[in-house]
Image: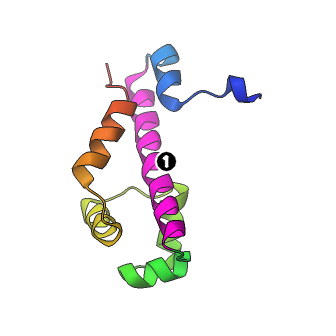
Amino acid sequence: MSKDEIVSVSDYLKKHSKDPSLRSELERIDVSAIIASKIIKHRIENKLSQSELAKKLGVSQKLVSKWESGRNNFTISTLEKLSEFFGWDLEYTFEKIDKRVPTAR
């Protein structure tokens, strides 16, 4: 697959998805990927390993790994911890995500 053939989940959904359950799952995955990349970016900018971030947040390194790989659903509590630690504005974060993820039809 060439770089020109790569499409975002949102673009794929707009073009191909008629199944509401598939659309819902792909939207969830897209949101998880956005949050995961944000965690990785901020962790690296703060020169922290997964273990160091886990210790500061009072969670396991395994959980941080799951967050970063998108294999874990984010709870409100988790998002609050991350936003407090990294200084994120959750409302702004979700406004940006909302603009990227299409609404289910």
> Does residue 42 show up magenta in the picture?
yes
> Residue 57 versus residue 27: which sits nearer the camera?
57
The quarter of the picture where the N terminus appears is top right
Number of on-image labels: 1
Q: Residue at x 36, y 57 (%)?
A: 74
Magenta span includes 27 = yes
Task: Name the image colouring.
Answer: rainbow
Q: Residue at x 29, y 44 (%)?
A: 94
Residue in the image at 30% along x and 65% along y: 87
Give the secondary structure at mark 1.
helix
Around disc 1, counting alpha carbons within 10 Å, would you say few (fewer than 14), some (14 to 19), or many (20 or more)?
some
Identify the residue under disc 1: 33
Judging depth in this view, the residue of 18 and 61 nearest the camera is 61
Residue 105 vs residue 9, the one in the foreground: 9
The residue furthest right is 1
Q: Main secondary structure of the magenta part?
A: helix
The C terminus lies in quadrant: top left
Image position of 39 with respect to 100: above or below: below
Decide: is 46 above or below 18: below
Residue 60 makes an appearance in the image: no
Spot occupied by residue 90 in the image (x, y as percentages of width and height): 26, 54
Picture layout, residue 24 above or below residue 57: above
Magenta span = 19-46
Q: Amino acid type of disc 1?
A: Ala
Q: Position of residue 55 (x, y in %)?
A: 43, 85
Residue 56 image point, x, y percent: 39, 83
Give x and y (percent) for residue 73.
Answer: 39, 55
Looking at the rendering, which quadrant does residue 44 occupy?
bottom right
- Residue at figure coordinates x 45%, y 29% from the top left: 22
The answer to whether residue 35 shows anywhere in this view is yes
